[in-house]
Amino acid sequence: MQEDISFYVEEASEGMENAIDHLQKELAKIRAGKASPAMLSGLLVPYYGSPTPLSQVANVSTSDSRTIVIQPWEKSMLAPIEKAIFEANLGFTPQNNGEVVHINVPPLTEERRKEMVKRSKALGEDAKVSIRSSRRDAMEHIKKGVKDGFPEDAGKRLEDEVQNLTTKYGEKVDQLIDSKEKEIMTI
């Protein structure tokens, strides 16, 4: 019986870790004035009639802190890639030189930086909600286990463990958001 309930602590930990992973991926998509291939993650390009992630039809890299270079595996993909970037309305103007697509990342305005910080904080809050949801689910299962005969003191220890995990992951979210805010606001 004890293994059954402690399983919920592990499950909560996994859920909280997934929330952190998701937050890191989402924060990577927010540009902080520096060019990054992650800015184009999630961009789908029509490839032989089906929407395909850009990373599967081209090599995406940076040549310097302001330029993203997209080198398609096939030259016929230059126009569809360029069109997909325009249609995604990312605020970039791609330039096609017949071999590769270059994107010059413009420096951010103060207003845009503040907007991005706000968006980062909203993503952080979403991650915290997900963490608290994992906590709630684990606590419910532990309380139910105690009601069904699991030792009360062991249940209390598991609840404390879940609460400590929640605090730890909440602090991790705060650190990620603080570091992203510094990155965005640094000119």
Image (spheres, grey):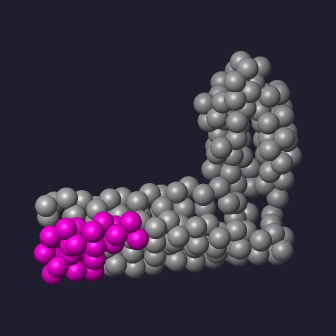
**Residue at position x 36%, y 59% from top?**
14
Left or right: where 52 falls relative to 102: left
**Residue 15 percent location from the top left of the image:** 40, 60
Does the magenta run of residues contain 159?
yes
Q: Quadrant of the C terminus?
A: bottom right
The magenta region covers: 136-161
Q: Quadrant of residue 144?
A: bottom left
* Of the pair 36 and 66, the residue shown nearer to us: 36
Left or right: where 120 falls relative to 151: right
Q: Is residue 34 visible?
A: no
**Residue at position x 34%, y 78% from top?**
163
* Of the pair 127 and 117, the residue shown nearer to us: 127
**Residue at position x 15%, y 70% from top?**
150
**Residue at position x 52%, y 77% from top?**
174
The relative height of residue 79 versus residue 152 in the rendered view (above or below) is above
The relative height of residue 74 versus residue 161 in the rendered view (above or below) is above
**Residue 70 percent location from the top left of the image:** 71, 37
* Of the pair 74 and 178, the residue shown nearer to us: 178
Does the magenta run of residues contain 94?
no
Left or right: where 19 falls relative to 36: left
Q: Quadrant of the N terminus?
A: bottom left
Q: Is residue 134 visible?
A: yes
Q: Quadrant of residue 159?
A: bottom left
Q: Quadrant of residue 165?
A: bottom left
The relative height of residue 62 versus residue 96 in the rendered view (above or below) is below
* Most common secondary structure along the magenta stretch: helix
Left or right: where 31 falls relative to 10: right
**Residue 83 percent location from the top left of the image:** 84, 34
